[in-house]
Image (cartoon, rainbow, N blue to C red):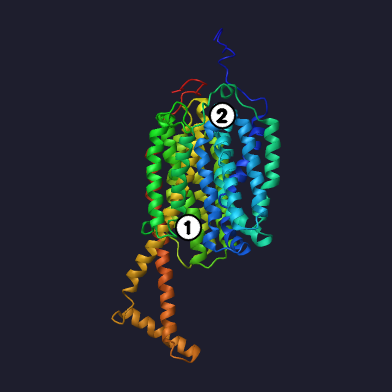
Amino acid sequence: MANGTPTAAAQPWKPAANPWLIAAAVMSATFMEVLDTSVANVSLTHIAGSLSASTDEATWVLTSYLVSNAVILPATGWLGRFFGRRRFLITCITIFTIASALCGVANSLGFLIFARILQGAGGGALQPVAQAILLETFPPEKRGQAMSVYAMGVVVAPILGPTLGGWITDSYSWRWVFYINLPIGIAAIFMCLRFLEDPPYLKNAKAGKIDFTGFGLLALWIGCLQILLDKGQDEDWFSSNFIRWLAFLAVVGFVVFLAWELTRDHPIVNLQILKDRNLTIGVLLNFSVGAVLYGTTAVLPQFLQLLLGYPSLQAGLVMSPRGIGAIVGSMVAGRILTKVDGRLWMAQGAVVLGVTMYLLGGVNLDMAPGTVLVPIIISGFAVTSIFVPMTTFSVATIKRENMGDAAGLTSLVRNLGGSVGISLVTALVTRSTQAHQALMAGHMTNLDAPFRNQLSSLQHALSIQSGQAGQSQAYGVIYQTLQQQAGLWAYVEQFRMLVPICLLLVPIILLFKKAKGPAPAGAGGH
């Protein structure tokens, strides 16, 4: 520095194109990819019928995508250095778009699963690469705004996915769930070719030789874990030999993967960056927020459909306002983070999220759709209140050339958190329903006066209506009520279980270290 002016070498790199044009280019592709993680869920029965497959077989359409997607996520930093981030991103968007077209024309389940594996592999890099590009493109004082744009894609897309997928499938065909990716993908490719460029410190980075062993171990443990989480409930968890073998391979593969990667000069996944305190806290928070977000997104529509009798499209429409709350939360966070401490904003988001889980714990079988809308909208606001500053703080003290590695790890744990959240909450709802049903069935005996009175009243009412004794019908009505009440208690318990989990995020959030300045290339920035 001479005469108080920074030298050219000390000045931060700036892209030639407008940062907002770059954001539009990378986020259009990312929104499309995140949407595809959930948009096909409601189309499974249509896909199964069209391709002459069972519903259980059709679930591999979802599982295959999630597995291939998860395997690529943590390796995106290395792949970006090896191929060049711009070239790598454009190639991934191209693969994703072509695979979407193949999904749409598939005439057999096997071909569709193959196309989904290809689609997941192409789409796996889009989230972390988009995050890294946005963090590098925008100056530190505007990173909150950049992450608010990123949050709109990563948080809003999986919320809108089931509703959009249901509407497209009912109005047109399940094939259009995949065809809608084509124009967006083509536009994203042209925009990336026009506006995107690699920063100089990334051009000089060395990726080293391909770590085939590390990549194989990564695919083994993540693939086994993802299939275990996705199929565990259907296979009755550890009562199944298939699930036990998956768990064994996942644990062994993970341990060997850690030992291998920590001793390589050029690992496929740079685990050394987890020495950074902020990134480690960010990984833990991403996992937790992903579990709460995806877990509630999965079980709320189930509650509305199974217990309240909503059609799938109406259940999706009731869930959609969470996207409105998320968009508002992203916009507010992007502006307010320049004025308040991001840690305090995240803490209030965690508290508000806990309050919404408490409100959802008050659901009942007589409520109107409007009753659940308020907590749903507020929960969308709360999630993005956490997510936007959390993404910025996680990489605040990371070297700029390690942004890709950090983004890959945080995206992976967020998706794994989502898978764990869905599997855990769904399993607990099922087990809790069975437990409450067994408990209440113990009162359905002639020795119980309220049961005798209810049975007698129902028999009398049904005999007047049908002209017959109506005893079996009366038992049927009571058993149906018992199932509904047992299911209701199960959902209430799981929502209430999430309250302390949300509140426990507050002390973890406060452990974040606020960066004193941007981390320059080649410096730690601590």
- Depicted 331 relative to depicted 19: above or below: below
Element at label 2: helix
User: Which of 474 and 175 lies nearest the eye of the viewer?
Assistant: 175
Find the residue positioned furthest to the top.
3
**Considering the image in quadrants, where does the C terminus appear?**
top left
Residue 467 visible in the displayed image? yes
**Which quadrant of the figure has residue 50?**
bottom right
Looking at the image, is mark 1 or mark 2 nearer the viewer?
2
The disc placed on residue 82 is 2
Three-letter amino acid code of the residue under disc 2 = Phe
Q: Give the residue type that dot 1 points to.
A: Val
Residue drawn 60% across the image and 59% down it: 43
Tag 1 residue: 299
Q: Is residue 18 above or below residue 436?
A: above
Residue 163 locus on image (x, y percent):
60, 56
Q: Secondary structure at mark 1?
A: helix
Residue 55, horizontal then vertical, whole percent: 54, 62
Q: Residues within 10 Å of mark 2 (few under 14, many from 20)?
A: some
Q: Is residue 512 visible?
A: no
Residue in the foreground of this view, choosing between 379 and 60: 60
Which comes sooner in the sequence, label 1 or label 2? 2
Q: Residue at x 49, y 32 (%)?
A: 211
Q: Position of residue 128 (x, y in %)?
A: 54, 37
Q: For residue 479, which quarter of the picture? A: bottom left
Q: Nearer the viewer, residue 521 or 480?
A: 521
